[in-house]
Amino acid sequence: MADTTPKTQDAEPEIRKGLAGVYADYTAISKVNAETNSLLYRGYPVQELAATCSFEQVAYLLWHGELPTDEQLAELTAVERSFRSLDPEIKQIIDVLPTSAHPMDVLRTAVSAIGALDPGADDSSIEANLAKSVQLFAQIPAVVAYDQRRRHGLDIIEPNDELSYAENFLYITFGEVPDPVVVEAFNVSLILYAEHSFNASTFTARVITSTLSDLYSAVVGGIGALKGPLHGGANEAVMHLFDEIGSADRAADWLAGALAEKRKIMGFGHRVYKNGDSRVPTMKASLDTLVEYYGRPDLAELYDALETAMTSGKNIKPNLDYPSGPAYHLIGFDTATFTPLFVAARITGWTAHIMEQLAANSLIRPLSAYNGVDERHLAE
C-alpha cells in the first residue's frame, strides 16, 4: 500500500548575510571584551599596549603569545632590520607599474612577487612561516615608501638599520626622522591597526590558508579584501569626505544632504562595537598631538563638527579610520597610501592568524541556500 503521509519539507536554512553573528572558529589572538568595550591582544588591552610598547613588541606578542624579553626583542629587531631592503627585482617590478595604479595594487603585486622569489614559499612549517612573517613585516614599509616617493619623482631612500621600525618607516618615506611626537603617534596607529579578530581581510587570509595554500597567497588575499572602502579603504574615504566638506561650518549641512541622498558616511559605525570603537580615544589623543604640532586647528574643528553632527543626527560613533585618516594626512602620507599603512600594521595580525589556522586546520567551506530556478532540462 502506497505511503500517503505528506512529505515534510526540509527546514528553511537560516541565512546570516555577511556571516553576521556566526562563530567560525576559536582564536587566542584577540577579542573585544564586551564588559569593558576593550580590544584585547592576547589578553592585553590595546590602549595599554599603545601607551607603553613599541610596534616591534606588539608584533612579537601577536606571533608568540607573550611580550618579548629584552633578549627576544633584540633578536626580533636584528632579524627585522636585516630584511628591510628590497631585492632589485622587486624594485624593477614596482617601476614597471604605472603611477596611476592604486598603491594597494602596487603593494599587492609586490607581495606576490616577494613570494614568487622565495624558493621556500611552499614550506608551511612554523619556523618558515615565522621567518616569512618577519620578512613581510620588514619589507612592506619599504614597498609603501618606495611607491610614494616614485609618484613624486623623488629619489629612493635606503633603510637605516639604526632606527626603530616606526622611525625607519618615516625616514624612508620622507627623508628624515621627524620629531618624537610624530614618531609616537605613528607607532600608536600601527599598534591599533595590528589586529582585530575575524575581520573581512583576516577571514579571507584564513580561508585561503585552510586550503593549505602558502602564506604569501593568504596575505595577497588579505590585501585584496582590505582594499575595499567598507574595510581598510575607509581611512582614505575619511579624507575625501573632509576635502569635500571643506570647513567645520559646512559639516552639519553637508551631512544632512549626504544622509538625504542615503550616502554611507565612512569612518563611522562598526559591526562589533556597540558602544563605540574602543581604539578611537587612543588614536584621537594622538591626532590631537599632531594637530597641535602642525598647527592645524582647522582640521580638528572639522573633525569635531562632523562627529558631533553624526552622533546627534544618527547616534553613530566613529571607528578607528576616522582619526587615523587625518593623522596620516598631517604626517605627510598621500591619501591613497593610507590603506597600505593599514597593511603594514595588519600584516602582524594576518600572519598570526595564518599560523593559528594551520595549527588546527579545517577546510573552510560553508554551505549556500539555492534560490534559483528549479531543475530543468534541455529540450530533446
Image (cartoon, rainbow, N blue to C red):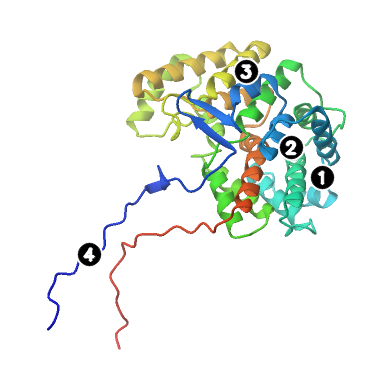
Q: Earlier in the sequence, mark 4 or mark 2?
A: 4
Seen in the picture, residue 103 relative to 316 is either above or below; the reply is below
Q: Nearer the viewer, mark 1 or mark 4?
A: 4
**Mark 4 falls on what kind of element?**
loop
Q: Which residue was labeled with disc 1?
A: 86
- Asked if residue 305 can be seen in this view, the reply is yes
Q: Residue at the location (38% across, 48% down)?
A: 17
Percent of width and height locating residue 203: 54, 47
Q: CA distance from mark 3 to mark 2?
A: 21 Å
**Res 176 → quadrant:** top right
Tell me if label 3 and label 2 are in contact, CB under 8 Å.
no
Tell me if label 1 and label 4 are in contact, CB under 8 Å.
no
Mark 1: amino acid: Leu
Q: Earlier in the sequence, mark 1 or mark 2?
A: 1
Q: Which residue was labeled with disc 2?
A: 141
Q: Residues within 10 Å of mark 1 (few under 14, many from 20)?
A: some
Q: CA distance from mark 4 to mark 2?
A: 56 Å
Tell me if label 1 and label 2 are in contact, CB under 8 Å.
no
